[in-house]
Image (cartoon, rainbow, N blue to C red):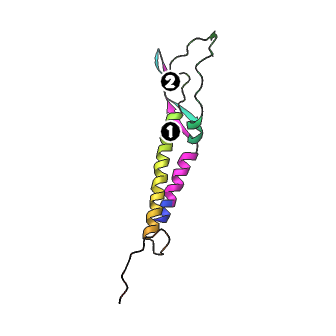
Amino acid sequence: MRIAGLVVGGAALVFALVPFTTSITLHDFAGDYPPTTLSCRSPLIEVTRPAPSDAGWFGYAPLTAAPPNFFGRPCSEPARNRLIVSAVGLFVAALLGWVSARIGGDPGPLRRRRWRPKPA
């Protein structure tokens, strides 16, 4: 069980720290464009990045409104989902480690000792 906990924990950390790719579809008034793959950084970086500002110049006209979702962050939602899965994986790994320490063969500080009456 300890090995399984280490494997699950390692996989959860890799899932949270390794860059990934996602697919997006751009929308226009003429219709949808073909799906495009987008290379994203680590989920920890993508989730903690500040949102871009909607104010300022768009194209050549100052202070004109940008199309909806033009300044969106297409990597943030998949990164958030990856971090949730990674957190669940780390919880399962900790649970497996705790269970393996409780039922392991060597009595450790985490293993509950039963009270047994001493013979008289």
Tag 2's secondary structure?
loop
Count of labels in the image: 2
The quadrant of the image that shows the N terminus is: bottom left
Q: Is residue 73 above or below residue 56?
A: below
Q: Position of residue 24 (x, y in %)?
A: 50, 30
Q: Is residue 24 above or below residue 62?
A: below
Neighbours of disc 1 within 10 Å: few (<14), some (14-19), many (20+): some
Residue 80, which numbered label? 1
Q: Residue at x 50, y 64 (%)?
A: 3
Looking at the picture, tell me which residue is in the foreground, 77 or 25: 77
- Separation (CA) of disc 2 from disc 1: 21 Å
Q: Position of residue 48 (x, y in %)?
A: 58, 37
- Most extreme residue toward the top is 61
Residue 70, which numbered label? none
Q: Are marks 2 and 1 in contact (CB under 8 Å)?
A: no
Q: Residue at x 45, y 55 (%)?
A: 92
- Residue 40 in sight from this viewpoint: no
Query: What type is the residue that disc 1 sits on?
Result: Arg
Tag 1's secondary structure?
helix
The quadrant of the image that shows the C terminus is: bottom left
Query: What type is the residue that disc 2 sits on?
Result: Leu
Q: Residue at x 53, y 47 (%)?
A: 15
Look at mark 2 in the image and give the residue it sits on: 26
- Most extreme residue toward the bottom is 120
Q: Does the magenta portion include 104?
A: no
Looking at the picture, tell me which residue is in the foreground, 70 or 54: 54
Q: What span is colored magenta in the figure? A: 6-27
Neighbours of disc 2 within 10 Å: few (<14), some (14-19), many (20+): few
> Which one is earlier in the sequence, the residue at label 2 or at label 1?
2
Q: Position of residue 57 (x, y in %)?
A: 63, 15
Q: Does the magenta portion include 19?
A: yes
Q: Position of residue 20 (x, y in %)?
A: 55, 41
